[in-house]
Amino acid sequence: MSGQSSFFAATGFSKNRSRIRCVDAVCDMARRLWPSKTAINLSSRAEISKRAAELWLEGRTEPGADALVNLLRSDVGFELLQQIMQGSGTRWWTEFETGVHLAELNEKHEFLRKQIEALKGRMK
């Protein structure tokens, strides 16, 4: 057994279906975000070869820790984290996700407030 295989087994990234398979979360997200050129988009963000991304998508290999870190640090990192944490029900995740949603709504609110003020200024 390779060092990588024992790492994944010890961390819950194994092929045991009772646990979340990391590769499934990654591939589901990738297919949803990039229905065409999935492997190329995935490989560029994970900083792996296109062939390695294709093997993930085929379910033949699983991501290594470095590739996961690269994905989490990329422009799709939060979406991947949401995919991985989906249904976890943990308190910290629920609070974090709520905080992110509130921040997004506050941004939208501020944008709309500025638009309203600009329109009111044109009416005077």
Image: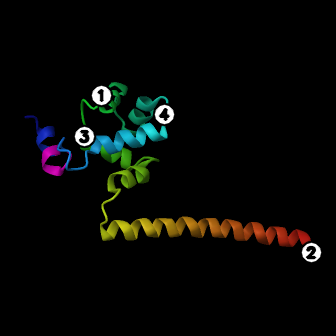
Residue under pointer 1 = 55
| Separation of residues labelled 3 and 1 (CA atoms) | 12 Å
Q: Is residue 20 above or below residue 49?
A: below
Q: Is residue 81 above or below residue 117?
A: above
Q: Residues within 10 Å of mark 2 (few under 14, many from 20)?
A: few
Residue under pointer 4 = 35
Q: For the residue labelled by badge 3, is the local secondary structure a helix, a strand or a loop?
A: loop
Reading the chain from its start, which is encountered first: label 1 or label 4? 4
Instruction: Choose mark 1 or mark 2, whichever is in front.
Output: 1
The amino acid marked with disc number 3 is Gly
Tell which residue pokes out farthest to the bottom in this image: 124
The amino acid marked with disc number 4 is Pro
| Separation of residues labelled 3 and 2 (CA atoms) | 61 Å
Instruction: Choose mark 4 or mark 2, whichever is in front.
Output: 4
Residue 117 location (% of width, % of height): 78, 72
Q: Is residue 48 rendered to the left or right of residue 106?
A: left
| Separation of residues labelled 1 and 4 (CA atoms) | 16 Å
Residue under pointer 3 = 64
Q: Residue at x 38, y 41 (%)?
A: 28
The amino acid marked with disc number 1 is Leu
The amino acid marked with disc number 2 is Lys
| Separation of residues labelled 4 and 2 (CA atoms) | 49 Å
Q: Residue at x 58, y 70 (%)?
A: 106
Reading the chain from its start, which is encountered first: label 3 or label 2? 3
Residue 81 location (% of width, % of height): 37, 53
Q: Residue at x 30, y 28 (%)?
A: 55
Instruction: Choose mark 3 or mark 1, whichever is in front.
Output: 1
Q: Is residue 64 above or below residue 104?
A: above
Residue 79 location (% of width, % of height): 43, 51
Residue under pointer 2 = 124
Q: Is residue 110 rendered to the left or right of residue 18?
A: right
